[in-house]
Amino acid sequence: MKAQNRILCSLTLSNLVLIGCIALVNSFINPYGFFIYLPGLLCVHQYHWIDPYRGLISLLICGFMWDHFFFHTFGFHAFLLSLLFLLIRQFLHSAKQTRQQILYLHIGINSSLAVAWFLTTHLMQTEFGIWKIGRFFSDLFLSSIIIIPISFWHTQFSSKLIDLLAGLKNLDQPVSR
Amino acid sequence: MVFIALPAGWKAITRTAFNEFEAPLWEITSRISDLTDYWGHQADSKKTLISKNRDLSRIRSDWELQKSNKEKWESEIAKLNGLRSQVEALREKIGLDKEISYSPILSRVTRRNLNSWWQEFSLRKGSIHGIENGLGVIFSKGVMGRIYHTGLNSSKVQLATNPNFRIVAHFQGDDRPVTFQGNGILVGGQPMGNVWDVPHDIQIEKGKSLLLETSSLGGTFPGGLSIGWVTSLEESGDGLFKNGSVLLPRDIGKVSEVTILLSKKVGGKEP
């Protein structure tokens, strides 16, 4: 298998593990009126190691999975994440981001997606209820706090998985610290 | 844009495939969690075992007490059966439909998905256990929801708090039908619902509340099951009826085992 395909599989797997973990955590905390919303984490910086077509395939799979697991309009996150990925690809290409910059990127993408979904539930006719404004702010606040440790962990996890499955380590030292 | 243009059939197939793919994952997770719980109890301290034994002996003594009342209950059952046959005879005489009977199926919850816009539970039982879409689901404190998706070995429950959950209900002690609809879960975990079409003469005194119950008119649930409490009612826009908010039991989101009501009239098959 080509190295690019192995990276693609590693990144998709690491994102699917993340989605599964978030679903499990949500299953425990949801009864207390909180929901952890973290699709922004799926846009990991390691996607710049593969060509955009493979990156899009991986993000589409993960986005569809997210939509299915957390009951969004099927394809909403898949296509929005892909669009955001194409937009920020230039930023990722510089490959000189620190962990803090990656964290800001994750928070930025996550908040944009949250706002987009909030507006969709309010403005468009969907089969779902609305993301109530009180819940929106509390969920987003909680998610923005939880994203800090998970962003660091997920970045490391993706790198380790690529190292393990594709045998590639620090292609261009993207994380300086 | 391409995805929006895709036919609904293809989207439905994809969604079903995702469902069947994901269900075993949650079942494994849930079984591992049960196993962890079991092994956790294996390591219980002496103190814990003594306190559990004490609770068990209390339950046993209560059971003995109930056994001593057996004769009394048997005569009550005979009396009730007599009354039931009288009611059946009267129903037949005036040409009313027979009441639907239900048989229960117990199932464990594998996963909860309770965000603001959609509330659902995944269950361990599916179509091979006789589960069908539309069956009612209850728990110890009343109505839980309705089955809306059935896989081979798993199913999904639309919770009573789900905005798409709508049933006929009535207030305790009042036979007139009203409409209940789910209204999400508040921050802090209070499950909410709305009640519509409440007759004008129903009043709630300040500091008191009315119990909302299921009505047998809907067909999904037997009549008289608790839904939630209504603390206040306000005028609807048309001035003909009243509306209000319903407080559902807080435990609704924390339940780990539920009962599916297999309607013999609708489901047909015996479990």
Image (spheres, helix red, strand yellow):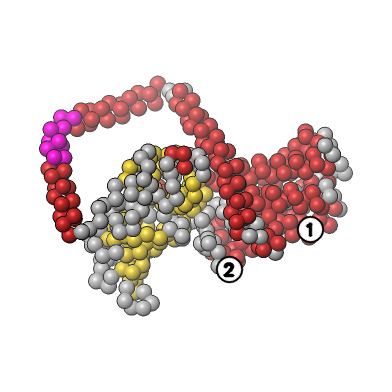
Q: Chain of mark 2?
A: A
Near-viewer residue (A30 or A79) = A79
Q: Return the x and y of residue A4 as percentages of the image width and height.
A: 83, 42
Above or below residue B93? Residue B31 is: above
Callout 2 crowding tier (Cα within 10 Å): few <14, some 14–19, many ≥20:
few
Indicate the quadrant containing the C terminus of chain A: top left, top right, bottom left or bottom right: top right
For residue A156, say whether it is visible: no
User: Which residue occupies the extreme bottom position in the image?
Assistant: B238
Label 1 amino acid?
A: Leu
Residue B71 falls inside the magenta stretch: yes
Residue at image mark 1: A86
Label 2 amino acid?
A: Met
Q: Return the x and y of residue B85 as percentages of the image width and height.
A: 16, 47
Q: Return the x and y of residue A26 as percentages of the image width and height.
A: 55, 47
Q: Main secondary structure of the magenta part?
A: helix
Indicate the quadrant containing the N terminus of chain A: top left, top right, bottom left or bottom right: top right
At x 67%, y 52%, the residue is: A63
CA gap, disc 1 to disc 2? 25 Å
In the rendered structure, find residue A166 and report the number of the disc placed on it. Answer: none
At x 25%, y 27%, the residue is: B60
Q: Which residues are magenta?
A: B67-78
In the rendered structure, find residue A124 and report the number of the disc placed on it. Answer: 2
Q: Chain of mark 1?
A: A
For residue B7, say whether it is visible: yes
Q: Is residue A70 left or right of residue B87?
A: right
